[in-house]
Amino acid sequence: MGRDKAYLEIGGGTVLRRVLDAVFLVCDDVVIAAGRRSHDFAGIPRVTCVDDPPGTGGPLAGVVAGMRSASNSTCIVVACDMPFVDPKLLAHLLDRLDDCAAAVPVFGGSPQPLQAAYSTTCLPTAECMLRLGDNSMRSLLDRIPVRFIGERQVGRIDPGNLSGFNMNTVADLDFARHHWVQRRQRVATA
């Protein structure tokens, strides 16, 4: 999009603020791993900012950095370009981590590893992948025990099925802004 998606404005707040609001309903503390930009988020209450491991980059590097800093053995991972994250879905994902390393929802036929719950037991695998130059979240899912939460189940928790919406284009941003306004209007008239 040519801009940092975390700072895009939707409904009077940034996308990052929308994500944080949802995550804080499920988690006491948040770790933001945003590569070199991490420290731009310093000063947000209950937020710790971390850098990616040296010589790495991409989402898996951020997950590794976040897990290394986590104070719990389970973590929620959410990308900063998902303005409609549903806290009920995040809580459900955490509840489904009982005997696996990850609980990952499926949206549009594809797993969404960047809105999922992970056990820190997958950290050694993720670190090894980074050392070998593989920074693919999908590759991580191939190497650890995963419970996929199917679209039907996700739809029961999030009937609008917008939790998995992420913004990659200006058209996506326009949709998100329009939907946010409609959402506010529905709440105001209810």
Image (cartoon, rainbow, N blue to C red):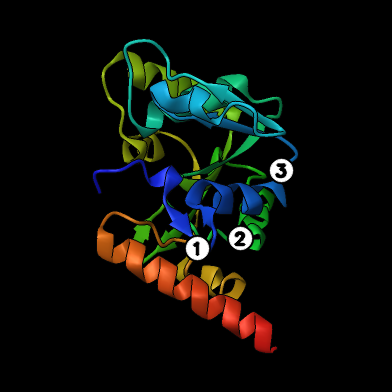
Residue 186 at x, y percent in the picture:
60, 84
Q: Could you say which quadrant of the image residue 164 lies in?
A: bottom left
Numbered label attached to residue 163 = 1
Residue 91 at x, y percent in the picture:
68, 54
Question: On the image, numbered disc 3 is attached to which residue?
Answer: 27
Relative vertical location of residue 102 with respect to residue 63 in this rendering, above or below = below
The amino acid marked with disc number 1 is Ser
Distance between the alpha carbons at the discs numbered 3 and 2: 13 Å
Relative vertical location of residue 171 with respect to residue 188 in this rendering, above or below = above
Residue 1 at x, y percent in the picture:
25, 49
Q: Which of 64 and 181 is in front in this view?
A: 181
Sequence-wise, the earlier of marks 1 and 3 is: 3
Question: On the image, numbered disc 2 is attached to which residue?
Answer: 89
* Number of marks present in the image shown: 3
Q: Is mark 3 on a helix, strand or loop?
A: loop
The amino acid marked with disc number 3 is Cys
Asked if the residue at tag 1 contacts the one at tag 2, i.e. Cβ–Cβ closer than 8 Å, the answer is: yes
Is residue 44 toward the left or the right of residue 152 in the image? Answer: right
Q: What element carries label 2?
A: helix
Distance between the alpha carbons at the discs numbered 1 and 3: 17 Å
Sequence-wise, the earlier of marks 2 and 1 is: 2
Q: Could you say which quadrant of the image residue 188 lies in?
A: bottom right
Q: Residues within 10 Å of mark 3 (few under 14, many from 20)?
A: some
Numbered label attached to residue 74 = none
User: Which quadrant: the C terminus?
Assistant: bottom right
The amino acid marked with disc number 2 is Leu
Residue 178 at x, y percent in the picture:
42, 74
**In the image, what residue occupies the spot 51% across and 80% down?**
182
**In the image, what residue occupies the spot 35% across and 56% down?**
167
